[in-house]
Image (cartoon, helix red, strand yellow):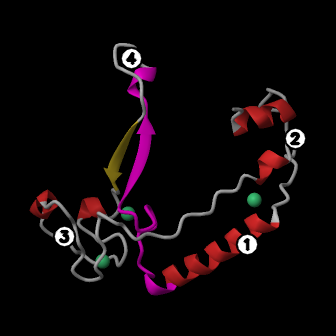
Amino acid sequence: MTSVYEAWAAILGDDPDKQVEPTPIVHTSECDDRFAAWKVEHAAYLERWPNVCQECGGQGGFEYQDDPGDRDCSLSGGTTTFSEPCSECLENGTCPRCGKEAWPDSEMFDADELTCSYCGWADSAPDGLPEVPECLCWEEQLP
Ligand SMILES: [Zn+2]
Ligand SMILES: [Zn+2]
Ligand SMILES: [Zn+2]
């Protein structure tokens, strides 16, 4: 499986200083449709929740995947998912979605589930901004 970077490197060459305009991607109509639907959802969400956290988009945190075995061979391989609370909202006790101070008391973070008493946002099923649809149109256009 070729990564995006490798694919573009094959086209542009390995010299990062070489300024070559990448070929503009022509999206399939399916991709265009998904993007148009996302735009509508995105606008509707922002209209309903204008104070959504700019940093995490209402998710309340970030998930990232890491494979500790990559660096330390004594650890067994496998990717682990970590999550971090967003430093702009959840960490300050602010609701990621409505922006109100929903958890002024840090002890409340010991609760199994965080639920915003103002808007009902819950960390078990965070309702954030809709995710940008995945676009794989570039794949079709590789030489
Ligand atoms: Zn596309
Ligand atoms: Zn946030
Ligand atoms: Zn809220």
Nearest to N terminus: mark 4 or mark 1: 1
> What residue sits right under mark 2 in the picture?
20
Nearest to N terminus: mark 1 or mark 3: 1
Nearest to N terminus: mark 3 or mark 2: 2
Instruction: Identify the magenta region.
Output: 47-70
Q: Amino acid at mark 3?
A: Trp
Residue at left 34%, top 66%? 125
Question: Cβ–Cβ below 8 Å for labels 1 and 2?
Answer: no
Give the number of the mark in front: 1 or 2. Answer: 1
Question: Cβ–Cβ below 8 Å for labels 3 and 4?
Answer: no
> What residue sits right under mark 3 in the picture?
103
Q: Is residue 15 magenta?
A: no
Give the number of the mark in front: 4 or 1. Answer: 1
Counting other residues with Cα less than 10 Å from the Cα at mark 2, is it few (<14), some (14-19), or many (20 or more)?
few
Callout 2 secondary element: loop
> What residue sits right under mark 1 in the picture?
33
Label 1 residue near ligand 1, CB within 8 Å: no
Counting other residues with Cα less than 10 Å from the Cα at mark 4, is it few (<14), some (14-19), or many (20 or more)?
few
Figure quadrant of residue 115:
bottom left
Q: Amino acid at mark 4?
A: Asp
Cα gap from disc 2 to disc 4, whole angstroms = 38 Å
Nearest to N terminus: mark 3 or mark 4: 4
Figure quadrant of residue 24:
bottom right
Cα gap from disc 4 to disc 1, whole angstroms = 44 Å
> What residue sits right under mark 4 in the picture?
72
Callout 4 secondary element: loop
**Quarter, ligand 2:** bottom left
